[in-house]
Image (cartoon, rainbow, N blue to C red):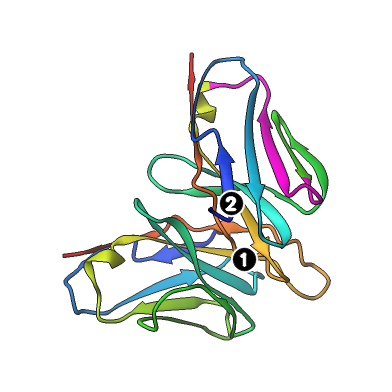
């Protein structure tokens, strides 16, 4: 069993739909990152969470440390949101030692 | 403010050769981490450096090594290249120390290595 499990692996949506990506992990963590990767490789960190909930624009991330679960929500999805979304817990006292989920490929159609 | 800079962006090597990749973090960032991305294994953690010291190392053979300089720039080296080392190598920096430890990671564009 992988230490980090994301679901779904592939997600197709129509513009405007509400999107949820889930992440479950079994490792002990100091924080959890949600990353976005567009075709071509560049990775952007969307959120770093150690508890509760964070919001940036149309993106919301939540984490439940006791249940070892995090979710990324996109409200009013847009074609430019099409990308791979990766959950990455950071272990121990490190913020850079990441264990990566396999990623969720999101495609938003106009 | 300049972002994280990785050089070279693309390179082609043959089996048995060695390669050195460079990462210049955002000014003021003292922590640099390295990652490997392949189609088969996905993203994997390689190393984490802070103040010229390796703080963590991933599960990679000894052919993979790295270092960090006093100006926080970091290099990683892969010796005796194998076909399976073909990958995108990414580095990320974060602000750490002096009461300004946010933990947020900023990624470079990566160095794409092809081993023939």
Residue B28's image quarter? bottom right
Q: In which quarter of the image is the N terminus of chain B?
A: bottom right
Mark 1 sits on what residue? A96
Q: What element carries label 1?
A: loop
Q: Quadrant of the C terminus of chain B?
A: bottom left
In this rendering, position of residue A72 left or right of residue A13: right
- Where residue A103 appears, as percent x and y from the top left, is 50, 43
- Where residue B45 appears, as percent x and y from the top left, is 51, 66
Q: What element carries label 2?
A: strand
Q: Nearer the viewer, residue A38 or B25?
A: A38
Answer whether residue B78 is visible to the viewer in this image: yes
In this rendering, position of residue A68 left or right of residue A40: right
In the image, is residue A69 part of the stretch drawn in magenta? yes
Q: Mark 1 lies on which chain?
A: A
What stretch of residues is rendered in magenta? A64-78
- Residue at image position (56%, 68%) is B25
Residue A100's image quarter? bottom right
Whole-angstrom CA distance, mark 2 to mark 1, is 16 Å
Mark 2 sits on what residue? A4
């Amino acid at each position: 069993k992988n230490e980090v499990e994301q679901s779904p692996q592939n997600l197709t949506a129509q513009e405007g739909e509400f999107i949820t990506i889930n992440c479950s992990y079994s490792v002990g963590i100091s924080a959890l990152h949600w990353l976005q990767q567009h075709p071509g490789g560049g990775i952007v960190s969307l959120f770093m969470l150690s508890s509760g909930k964070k919001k940036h624009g149309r993106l919301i991330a939540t984490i439940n440390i006791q249940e070892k679960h995090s979710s990324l929500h996109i409200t009013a999805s847009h074609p430019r949101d099409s990308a791979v979304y990766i959950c990455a817990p950071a272990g121990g006292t490190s913020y850079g030692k990441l264990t990566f989920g396999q990623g969720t490929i999101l495609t938003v159609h106009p | 403010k300049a972002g994280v800079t990785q050089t070279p962006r693309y390179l082609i090597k043959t089996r048995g050769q060695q390669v050195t990749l460079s990462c210049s973090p955002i000014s003021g960032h003292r922590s640099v981490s390295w990652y490997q991305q392949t189609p088969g294994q996905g993203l994997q953690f390689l190393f984490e450096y802070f103040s010229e010291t390796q703080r963590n190392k991933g599960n990679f053979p000894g052919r993979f090594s790295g270092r960090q300089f006093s100006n926080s720039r970091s290099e990683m080296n892969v010796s005796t290249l194998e076909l399976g080392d073909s990958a995108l190598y990414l580095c990320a920096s974060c602000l750490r120390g002096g009461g300004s430890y946010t933990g947020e990671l900023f990624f470079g564009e990566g160095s794409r290595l092809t081993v023939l």
